[in-house]
Amino acid sequence: SQTIHQWPATLVQPVGSPLSLECTVEGTSNPNLYWYRQAAGRGLQLLFYSVGIGQISSEVPQNLSASRPQDRQFILSSKKLLLSDSGFYLCAWSPGQGAETQYFGPGTRLLVL
Amino acid sequence: ILNVEQSPQSLHVQEGDSTNFTCSFPSSNFYALHWYRWETAKSPEALFVMTLNGDEKKKGRISATLNTKEGYSYLYIKGSQPEDSATYLCAAETSGSRLTFGEGTQLTVNP
């Protein structure tokens, strides 16, 4: 069966510090991978998605970047965090064929102070 | 950018009540409509993926309908239980497996 992992679960970082959140998927190959964020009082917003190694699409301009160095690894990064980067970050995967369920990881709660 | 709207924003019902909420989305470029259930401190859990106009899906006491021509979907819960308390999210999918989520309906079922 497939599982999706995210770490860390919680992170408190000062403004201006770098960020690296990691997501890995087990039990499947060549999945579509997604990063979402839920800011306080807001809905889930798609940040990045990837259909393959090295292929990243950005949905909104922002202070963050994503990379997919391996088939089942998706990394969300920032060189300098802003207060507005605080939120709950969810990674998800899907089989990649369209109209397919996306399966979410446990999430990372990020607080930038 | 798609505009996906859900109503009501929050809902309080008594145990045993049946309830429903709405998701509206642009009918152009429609590919699929997803419903998720998100409990506090857990990951969103998939309920349904629907693609066809007039489609109706059911999972236990929860069912959903889809009208792609007018751009809306209803989620129904029959005989609500306290464990149904959660935020119910809908998301519209356009090509490329990209989902645009609504802000959710927060359901509280009082015992």
Image (tube, rainbow, N blue to C red):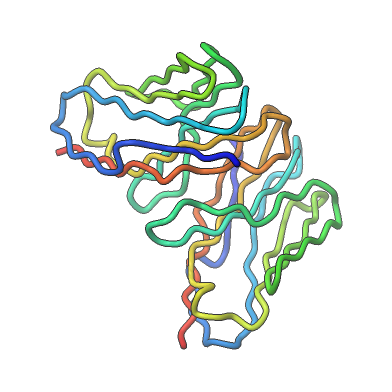
Residue drawn at (61%, 47%) of the image: B91
Q: Position of residue B86 (x, y in %)?
A: 48, 66
Residue drawn at (43%, 55%) of the image: B42
* Image quadrant where residue A90 sits: top left
**A29 in relation to B8, above or below:** above
Residue drawn at (22%, 39%) of the image: A11
Residue A29 or B96: which is nearer the viewer? A29
Q: Quadrant of the N terminus of chain B?
A: top right
**B60 in relation to B97, above or below:** below
Q: In the rendered view, does B5 fall on the left or right side of B103?
A: right
Q: Position of residue A16 (x, y in %)?
A: 16, 24
Q: In the rendered view, does A81 fall on the left or right side of A30?
A: left
Most distant residue in the top direction: A54
Q: Position of residue B49 (x, y in %)?
A: 71, 49
**B94 in relation to B48, above or below:** above
Residue drawn at (40%, 61%) of the image: B40
Q: Position of residue B25 (x, y in %)?
A: 67, 48
**Total residue callouts:** 0
* Image quadrant where residue A103 sits: top right
